[in-house]
Image (cartoon, helix red, strand yellow):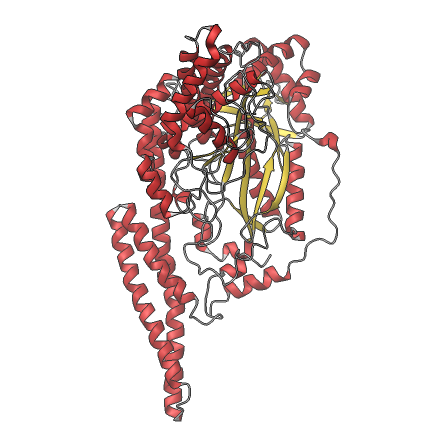
Amino acid sequence: MNKTRIHAIEKVASIRPPETMSVSFDINDYGTDVFGIECMRERLPKAVFKTLYKTIAESSPLDASVADDVANAMKRWAIDKGATHYTHWFQPLTGTTAEKHDAFLEPDSNGRAINSFSGKNLIVGEPDASSFPSGGLRATFEARGYTAWDPSSPAFIKRHPNGATLCIPTAFCSYTGEALDKKTPLLKSTQALAKAVKRFVKCFGETGEHMPKVTLGPEQEYFLIDKNFYFARPDLVQTGRTLFGAPPPKHQQLEDHYFGAIKHRVLTFMTDVERELWRLGIPAKTRHNEVAPAQYEIAPLFEELNLACDHNMMVMEVLRQKADEHGFVCLLHEKPFAGINGSGKHNNWSVSYNGYNLLEPGNDPHQNAIFLTMLCAVIQAVDDNADILRVATASAGNDHRLGANEAPPAIISIFLGEQLTDVIEQIEKGCLKSSKHGGIMKIGVDTLPPLPRDATDRNRTSPFAFTGNKFEFRAPGSSHSCAGANVVINTIVADALDKISTELEKFPKKNFNEKLQVLLQKIIKAHKRIIFNGDGYTAAWKKEAAKRGLPNAATTPEALGAFVSEKSKALFTKYNVFTEAELESRYEIFMEEYAKKVKIEGELSLSMARTIIQPAAGKQVAELAEGLVSMQAAGLTDGFTAKREMATILGRYLDSVTAKCNDLEAALKTGNQAPVLKAMAALRADVDALELLIDDEIWPLPKYREMLFIS
């Protein structure tokens, strides 16, 4: 008998959390492992700090002459923190982070050792680029790649049991200059949006020296399961999700896990995570139980976009590391368990200028005019580029999540809420009395009805929802880098703002508001189809969306084509975010990644079914057959029919599993993902049915009821 599952349950059941849990945290420890602004101010010469701060605050070009001074101060700080090595920390197109460690130690001519770290070491690194995904941008023999220091994201210390490493956030590009990472296009798109925002607000008479600020607050969902269960599930180890598993009678139906009391052992883990994040200057603010059992969420305060994206990658890494230390495994796959909630990464995006949030309703007619025009720009941007925005959410894992169990559908739409939709409709119709709030709607003349920050409800089925002073893009998956979604949002909004600014710049001052009202009416009439406040899960919405002409790319291969469309190429090259070659390369990388993941899952499903499931089912059938023979020999009739019927049912399923294994094997040989996924689903249906029939002591894999509830 396969005792792996039984032993896993026994081990997990025997775990006892510590009797006491230290929660002490000195607020002065916040950011102590970060070479941040105050640390720079303290350790750098005044002139050097002033030059570097200008680069950070205003996105001005880096003065290379300060590099040696910065490197020396950073080295001394890192060594004081216990660091022995440094690394250029970057984000290649694998969806994770990468690092190559170099020691500070260098021998001198006298056979002794010194700690060395120069400005050149700080600014540029040269990791091997040949083994990272390039989508044809680099041939295998073309190994040279470069990492370039990003001063806007501070260096930090990564600790491990035997020491520490100085991590320097960097961009990553090829020898010929093509971006091979997630950060480079993000920085370019942010710069493009900032330029468009400055032009836009200038049309309203707003001027200022500071650059517009794009902010992000990413909510990170994840699952925790005990590592004893994890290692007993080859599918979780290899793919991050369960390829087989029957949902238990109770999972999330009673809604008793959401915001419930956090288990002691889990809370110990969360506290440890937060301590580490706070030392890294990551403002982790919220922690709670999510909807599904064993599912949780962590959310930080808003930060500047580039830093928030880097911090989110660090959050995912800390979650995984601390989970391992506490005997858990952190699952960041979008759909680890079929039939219950998947995990997303809610992308809360906003933009401000001179300290004023452009997506926050104002207190006077002028501010409201800017707010409503900005709102219309986002509406236009999303409607014009819904297909490209969908690309930012496309992955094999997210295909299982979108449109199910509180995740938004693949159809991109905007939720505004009842009150704001009413305002938009009034603008479209002209100067009419409001049916909900009274008054006359005139942009920039009479104050709009009061629009408090929380003037909108929340709609969990909406991919792109206005939530008071920001837009929440709910469709990205939990394992995704924040960079992908925000590159698209930044660029499409920059394009919409530029188009609107071109019109605004033509308006004479004397009747600017009247002309603006006409322009907003025009935008709303042209793009209101993207606004939908209802239930995105219904079949009626799919029909309505098709009637409106909204794209519905249900799978990753369907979605990715929009990335290399002529429209997409024109948009991204216009703002120098991607070259055509970079777009083509990413399309190839993402398609190849999708194909590889489906192939891995298909091959593993086949292997598990043949080497784990079929033997277990065969053992059950054999035991029943032996029992029937014994009963017949003993002349026993009671229960004989029931036992024979059970053997027959199991035998039929066993035959069906065998046939569906053959179907899956044939599908894998075609190299086409669609038949593989179809064959996997058919095989899973039989295996999950067998799980509910086979003797509990014989079934070899940890079940949902164990993984989700025993911790």
In the image, residue 233 sits, relative to residue 169, either above or below, namely below
Quadrant of residue 577 in the image? top left
Q: Residue 586 in the image: state x and y as whole percent.
A: 36, 30
Q: How far across and down, in percent of the image, does residue 438 sit?
A: 54, 28
Name above or below for residue 678 compared with residue 158. below
- Say which quadrant the C terminus sits in: bottom right
State whether residue 555 appears in this view: no
Residue in front for this viewpoint, 679 or 518:
518
Q: Is 220 in front, or is 228?
A: 220
**Quarter of the figure with residue 136:** top left
User: Image check: 51 left or right of 464?
Assistant: right
Q: Nearer the viewer, residue 596 or 445?
A: 445
- From the viewer's side, name the closer residue of 80 and 693: 693
Work out whether 708 lies above or below 494. below
Count of numbered circles on the image: 0
Furthest residue in direction bottom, as rendered = 635
- The answer to whether residue 353 is seen in the rendering is yes
Who's the residue at 36% across and 47% down the image? 539
The reply, left or right, for residue 140 in relation to residue 486 is: left
Q: Position of residue 183 (x, y in %)?
A: 47, 25
Residue 65, percent from left and from top: 56, 8
